[in-house]
Amino acid sequence: MRIVLGVGGGIAAYKSASLLRLFTEAGHNVSVIPTEASTRFVGVATWEALSGNTVSSSVFDEVEKVNHVRLGHEADLIVVAPATADLLARAAAGQADDLLTNTLLMARGPVLFAPAMHTEMWSHPATRANVATLRSRGVLVMEPAVGRLTGKDTGAGRLPDPEDIFAAALAAAGLPVPDAGTAPAPAAGNAADGTALPSSDLSAAFGVSGALEGRTVTVTAGGTREPLDPVRFLGNRSSGKQGVALARAALAAGARVRLIAAHMDVPAPDGVELIRVETALELREAVHAAAPASDVLIMAAAVADFRPDRNSDTKIKKRDDGEDPVITLVRNPDILAEAVQERNASGTPGGGALPSVIVGFAAETGDGTAEVLDYGRQKLARKGCELLVLNRVGVSLVFGQDVTEVTLLSPADSETAPAPTYTGTKTEIAGRIIARISQELSAALPVR
């Protein structure tokens, strides 16, 4: 994986040398971009020796390589540690006055900031507003550690330990984090496969530590396949990445997680109860069995709306007379609507009926009749769920991608409190969804 390590001008810059070592020993190619101020704490020679790459902070070095564009565009992950108050402010404002801030503007993959500053700087309204702005854009900003600062003071603002930043960075990129006390595992590419990430390592990355402690969460993921014959099937482009990210985020939040998995391009995370299904009818049966024992049901799977009316026992062959086969489709059941109806028939949310929070997903395209948001609101009204995660889909959008954009719709949306829209990696989006579910759940149901 190609990583850009940005280093801000704080005394904690020396700790980033250990972070760089973790990345390189894990097999990643790291380009270090220090701010000019940071070179007063750690010199360029140190970064070049540890990274094996040329290091610069100026847009005017190696102009022929167009580094101010190339580095951010090619990076699979950008980590800024330490992120000073000044650097957070410049990033939030979209400034491009050095090589690092230019690179941040060019970022196309996940971005992680690890702040380090004095407590008063971190708690200042300007800094809090800058952090909120960055997070609203899908940027992951860790909480600083609490401890001894530069002088005699102690408080929030200490740079998180390099091991914690390393774990959060790999989680942001969807890579497995080595167990504590072991050498980093070799890099295995940059797909968001998310296997074997301990919840303790993920909590900082998702920002949901303990939010679902004592809860049971059922997540559906992947795309159903409806067989035509022993060889062919009707399917969809779902990779399962978002559902797996949601399962991992729920684990990080302390929940017991059940994953109902249709076809997925990525493995299921360790620590979940895994139920394998193939067709919409099999998924329906699994959901009906699991939902009454779940506090939360997240319907992230891409369920086929239709299936062939018959599944041929033998392969459908081309006919010598040139006639094309006719395949009749029948409608699959609406599993999300059924789950809401069954829950409501047994009570009301918060009144003993489970699941207390049901989350649907909508993959929509606009047309000449209505916009994507209009179709999403209509679907929310039809389904009756507590939250609907709306995706705009299309070529190279959402399905199989590592970066996505979602709007979280709820019946409580209004002109004064509109539905929020988030852009980021599917890991980051999963954290936001789980955090919102936690809020809904706290209002609806006491911990059992």
Image (cartoon, grey):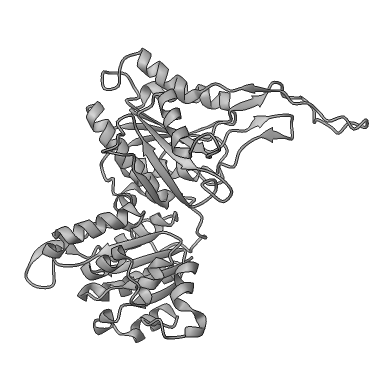
Please say if 306 is above or below 434.
above
Residue 350 placed where, x, y %?
26, 22
Q: Nearer the viewer, residue 396 or 53?
A: 396
Eyeballing the image, is 440 above or below 396? above
Q: Is residue 289 visible?
A: no
Q: Can residue 255 be spotted in the picture? A: yes
Between residue 359 and residue 68, name the one nearer to us: 68
Choose top left, top right, bottom left or bottom right for residue 86.
bottom left
Considering every residue shown, the one lying at the far left of the view is: 152
- Name of the residue lying farthest toward the right: 321
- Which residue occupies 63% across, 36% down? 235
Vertical relation: 336 (above or below) 149: above
Image location (x, y in percent) of residue 182: 38, 61
Left or right of 257, for residue 239: right
**Where's residue 197, x and y in %?**
40, 50
Q: Residue furthest top?
A: 345
Q: Name the residue nearer the viewer: 188 or 125.
A: 125
Residue, x 22% and y 57% (percent of image)? 129
Q: Residue at x 35, y 35 (%)?
A: 256
- In the picture, which quadrant includes the C terminus? top left
